[in-house]
Image (cartoon, grey):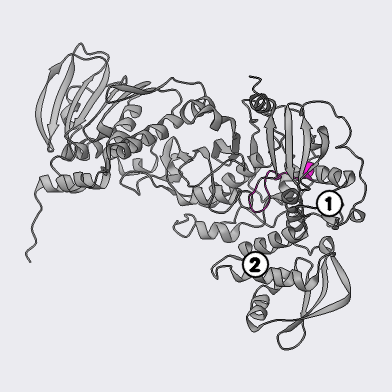
């Protein structure tokens, strides 16, 4: 077959197919052009979900008459001059492909005027050919009408979804843009009917409430952090506020919305064992990175990027999110949260991230040679601490702490000095050293004790602990609470040193099946590190010589069989950290107080003290809530007092 050049009209359509997938793609490109032009007001008009037409009117700087026809030439741009400019970009559109690509698959009518000019310019382009260019009257800025979308590419038009689906895609593009440009007023009309009229706001928090709804905004925690030349800010959801997919995760790099697996992986790592499996948080995170450290020229629609220092970025995201999640406490609707001391946070950061970071970085090229990973071993904590972790299934297993939860305490929660805008804006400066760098720990910060400041009312259903708070009720699931306490105890004391073990008076011999024996040998080191000391006893038998001291009341053989049953369903590709977590969660679940177990006052007091010491107490290790709050307003509605 003879090689020949494709017609120019066909090459334009092929190139357009890389950038323009649907009407929402057109809307994204035109909104980015308007923002690059300095627009502070955008009016967007959608007809039939964008399938019929799209119109965008902005008050940006407009274009000079001579530049208007040139803007529809492929690779014509004002954003680049030399090749190196590709690696220090500060604009959205830069390739010079948007307008010519749109004009290759639709009819484009553009009106534009710059402030000094008395008249503007009108141009009509269809099928990649200029039909008309003339002087016209118009306000300062640019108005673009795109119609006959995909009329000249009927095959592409057949793949469009329903009008409702296409409009939803357009609104999602507007949402992404609105969240990151709080200073831009956006008005949206659909078939002549106003859908949105979003005013400019002074900060992203207010814009978040306007776009996603006040209820969503009130359930979010502020995030802020700095590492070297990188910074992160934004909001994330409390652990009890989850979604069934990742659509509520919005990540921005230098104001540009991106879909990046590294960023999503870092977010999910921070929520590890705080939310249920196959559930996802809501987040709006804004990363500021030197332009030369980000390559945005790796995806036609610029939705994916590459980072020069992905490890540092990963570490910044995880630690910043952990700092916010560590201060979650029962929220009585007043927006107050309790920050965890940084010294406490450092001792509770999940175990090393090296394996998980490497998994996330497989698709990245790291420049500059080998670098030290941002995290070392998690901070170690001595195993001599007392608390509910040592309790047994009966009341005798408790030491009797001061009955803080049974006495009347001053009303209200202590507000963090920096708790502004409903969630606190504590800034963490992440040093270049590992979290466990040598040197003295900072003095522990004063921390409020939410449960200690409530009044314990009693136990209902032998499962839920009921507390009276300043404005409502707090219900605590006793099993979930104790499970989280035990898990954190295992994880902290097991980070580099063994958990305290309780030798058995009579070591127990257990005969295993060949499959279970092989499974045990595969996880032998992990299980032994938990204080469950096991030795081979010939054939497929093993002898259990000790149990974790905090679980010494359990049946040794039953505990081992339960552990093996949990591990049997683990995927063979699971990381060492995943397997270890599964063992620790199983141990915590087995040792925790059960539903239907009556607790005494001192036992409840111990739970309160332990929960108040935990930075991640909102959910159990499986992601189920530890507490729920019924506010005074909710009670008033139930009794029809509103």
Q: Residue at x 32, y 26 (%)?
A: 37
Q: Badge 1: how crowded within 10 Å, few (<14), some, or many (20+)?
A: many
- Residue at the image point whose x is 75% and y is 69% from the top: 559
Quadrant location, the N terminus? bottom left
Q: Which residue is mark 1?
A: 388
Q: Position of residue 538 (x, y in %)?
A: 75, 88
Question: Which of the 4 image quarters holds residue 612?
Answer: top right
Q: Which quadrant, please, contains the C terminus?
A: top right
Give yes or no for residue 485 being in the magenta stretch. Answer: no
Q: Would you place residue 362 above or below residue 605 in this image?
A: below
Q: Is residue 290 above or below residue 38?
A: below
Residue 492, given in percent of the width and then of the height, sits at 75, 55
| Residue 361 image label | none
Residue under pointer 2: 566
Cα distance, mark 1 to mark 2? 25 Å
SS assignment at label 1: helix
Q: Where on the picture, by quarter, is residue 454?
A: top right
Please, what is the dominant secondary structure of the magenta stretch? Answer: loop
Q: Is residue 503 left or right of residue 303?
A: right
Which segment did they paint magenta? 611-624
Q: Which secondary structure lies at badge 2?
A: helix
Can you give x and y, in whole percent of width and height, for residue 196 in the image? 39, 24
Q: Is residue 612 magenta?
A: yes
Q: Which residue reaches farthest top?
A: 118
Query: Image point 50% across, 56% down: which residue?
Result: 360
Which one is nearer the viewer's eye here, 559 or 353? Answer: 559
Q: Which sits earlier in the primary sequence, circle 1 or circle 2? A: 1
């Amino acid at each position: 077959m003879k090689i020949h050049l494709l017609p120019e009209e066909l090459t334009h359509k092929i190139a357009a197919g890389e950038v323009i997938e649907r009407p929402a793609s057109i809307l994204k490109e035109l909104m980015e052009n308007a923002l690059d032009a300095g627009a502070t007001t955008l009016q967007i008009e959608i007809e039939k979900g964008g399938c019929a037409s799209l119109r965008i009117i902005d008050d940006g700087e407009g274009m000079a008459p001579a530049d208007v026809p040139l803007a529809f030439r492929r690779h014509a741009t004002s954003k680049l001059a030399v090749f190196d400019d590709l690696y220090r970009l500060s604009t959205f559109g830069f390739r010079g492909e948007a307008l010519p690509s749109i004009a290759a698959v639709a009819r484009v009518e553009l009106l534009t005027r710059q402030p000094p000019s008395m008249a503007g310019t009108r141009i009509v382009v269809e099928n990649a050919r200029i039909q008309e260019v003339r002087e016209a009257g118009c306000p300062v800025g640019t108005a673009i009408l795109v119609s006959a979308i995909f009329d000249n590419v009927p095959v592409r038009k057949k793949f469009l979804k329903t009008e409702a689906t296409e409009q939803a895609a357009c609104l999602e593009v507007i949402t992404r843009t609105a969240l990151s440009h709080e200073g831009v007023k956006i008005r949206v009309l659909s078939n002549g009917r106003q859908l949105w009229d979003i005013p400019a706001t002074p900060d992203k928090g207010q814009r978040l409430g306007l776009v996603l709804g006040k209820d969503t905004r009130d359930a979010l925690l502020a995030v802020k952090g700095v590492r070297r030349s990188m910074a992160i800010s934004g909001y994330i959801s409390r652990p009890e506020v989850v979604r069934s997919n990742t659509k509520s995760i919005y990540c921005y790099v230098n104001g540009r919305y991106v879909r990046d697996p590294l960023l999503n992986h870092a977010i999910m790592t921070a929520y590890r064992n705080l939310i249920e499996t196959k559930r996802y948080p809501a987040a709006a995170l804004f990363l500021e990175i030197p332009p030369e450290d980000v390559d945005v020229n790796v995806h036609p629609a610029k939705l994916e990027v590459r980072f020069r220092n992905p490890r540092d970025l990963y570490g910044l995201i995880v630690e910043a999110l952990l700092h916010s999640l560590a201060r979650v406490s029962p929220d009585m609707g007043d927006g107050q949260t309790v920050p965890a001391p940084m010294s406490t946070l450092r001792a509770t950061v999940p175990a090393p991230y090296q394996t998980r970071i490497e998994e996330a970085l497989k698709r990245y090229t790291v420049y500059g040679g080998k670098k030290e990973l941002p995290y070392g071993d998690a901070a170690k904590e001595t195993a001599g601490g007392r608390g509910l972790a040592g309790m047994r299934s009966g009341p005798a297993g408790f030491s009797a702490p001061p009955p803080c939860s049974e006495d009347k305490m001053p009303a209200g929660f202590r507000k963090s000095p920096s708790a502004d805008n409903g969630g606190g804006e504590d800034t963490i400066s992440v040093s270049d050293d590992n979290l466990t760098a040598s040197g003295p720990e900072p003095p522990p910060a004063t921390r409020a004790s939410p449960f200690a400041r409530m009044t314990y009312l009693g136990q209902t259903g032998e499962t839920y602990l009921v507390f009276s708070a300043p404005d409502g009720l707090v219900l605590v699931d006793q099993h979930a609470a104790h499970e989280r306490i035990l898990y954190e105890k295992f994880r902290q004391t097991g980070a580099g040193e063994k958990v305290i073990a309780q030798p058995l008076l009579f070591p127990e011999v257990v005969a295993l099946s060949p499959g279970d024996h092989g499974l045990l040998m595969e996880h032998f080191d992990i299980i032994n590190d938990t204080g469950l000391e096991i030795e081979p006893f010939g054939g497929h038998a093993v002898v259990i010589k000790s149990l974790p001291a905090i679980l010494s009341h359990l049946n040794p053989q039953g505990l081992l069989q339960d552990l093996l049953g949990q591990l049997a369903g683990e995927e063979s590709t699971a990381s060492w950290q995943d397997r270890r977590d599964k063992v620790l969660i199983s141990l915590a679940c087995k040792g925790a107080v059960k539903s239907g177990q009556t607790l005494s006052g001192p036992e409840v007091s111990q739970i309160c003290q332990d929960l108040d010491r935990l930075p991640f107490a909102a959910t159990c290790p499986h992601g189920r809530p530890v507490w729920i709050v019924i506010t005074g307003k909710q009670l008033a509605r139930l009794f029809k007092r509103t």
